Amino acid sequence: MNKLTQGVVLLLFGGAILRASVTDLYLRYVKEGLRPFLIATGLLLVAAAVMTLWYSFRETPSDEDDHGHEHHGPSVGWLLILPVLGLLLVAPPALGSYAANQAGSVVAEPVGGSDYPALPAGDPVELSLVDYASRALFDAGKSLDGREISLTGFITVAPDGSPMLARMVLSCCAADGRPIKVGLDGRTPIDVPADTWVQLTGVYTARTAKDPVNNVDVAYFDVRTWQEIPEPKQPYA
């Protein structure tokens, strides 16, 4: 591609990244904390595109002759436009039940040693799936006993056909996403399609099981009530 086309492609890339970064679209790809880096990257690409276009328009035919004609890359370079168009035109769905069923549950390792802080006052208290599973598995539920708890996630299906609650956990971006899964007892959501987002209220149960994918312990939750909710703005944990 000549310099003019290179500048256009750079401008589209930078603009697409900036568009995703200033909206919530970037949350489908990376963790929330990476937004400043995406904005900086988008601005650098736009600046590089502007400089490339400026130099391209400044060149005259004699300049090209002096340099022995401008070299053109293979036309396959135009394929670079495809991911840009995808980012501009298509909002990809967040990773859901299919990805959760293909990967083993993350190990909900204890946070801050063996002593877990008491839960804040007021029931139901909202916990992340990682926090609930960690307290249930590594603290034997001591900090959960006697409390009404609220959990949010999407429905996935266990190997035996029973519903489970899950949420994808990111280390950096969606490419490394892995699920945290919680088994469900009590008044579980019945006949709810996979990938439906729900908010559950209930209490701790000592029941555990093994995730057949990677043999990791999975905590359970005793459901008292549940309701369908829209997918949250930040679908990943």
Image (cartoon, rainbow, N blue to C red):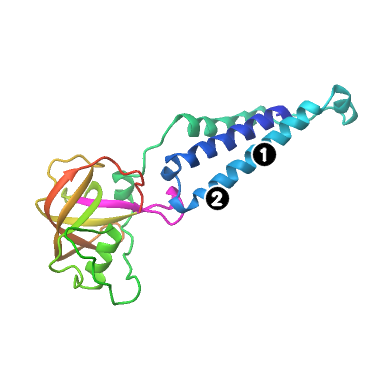
Taking the image as shown, residue 116 lies to the left or right of residue 30, namely left
Q: Residue furthest bottom?
A: 114
Residue stretch in magenta: 164-178
Amino acid bearing label 1:
Ala
Q: Position of residue 94 (x, y in %)?
A: 36, 42
| Residue 176 vertical position relative to residue 48 in the rendered view, above or below | below
Residue hosting label 1:
47
Q: Amino acid at mark 2?
A: Phe
At mark 1, the secondary structure is: helix
Query: Can you say which quadrant of the picture contains the N terminus?
Result: top right
**In the image: residue 118, left or right of residue 28:** left
Say if residue 40 shows up in the picture. Answer: yes
Q: Could you tell me which residue is drawn at 42 percent across and 41 percent down? A: 24
Which residue shows up at 13% across the image and 40% down it? 191
Image quarter of residue 140? bottom left
**Front residue of 223 and 70:** 223
Q: Residue furthest front?
A: 121
Q: Which residue is mark 2?
A: 37
Residue 29, quarter of picture: top left
Query: Which tag, 2 or 1, sits closer to the chain's start?
Result: 2
Q: Is residue 41 magenta?
A: no
Given residues 123 and 226, the one toward you in this image is 123
Crowding near the residue tagged with mark 1, few <14, some 14–19, many ≥20 C-alpha atoms within 10 Å: some
Find residue 116 and report its horizontal and vertical position in percent.
Answer: 28, 73
Q: Position of residue 235 (x, y in %)?
A: 34, 46
Q: Quadrant of the C terminus?
A: bottom left
- Residue 192 position in % (x across, y down): 17, 41
Residue extending farthest to the top is 61
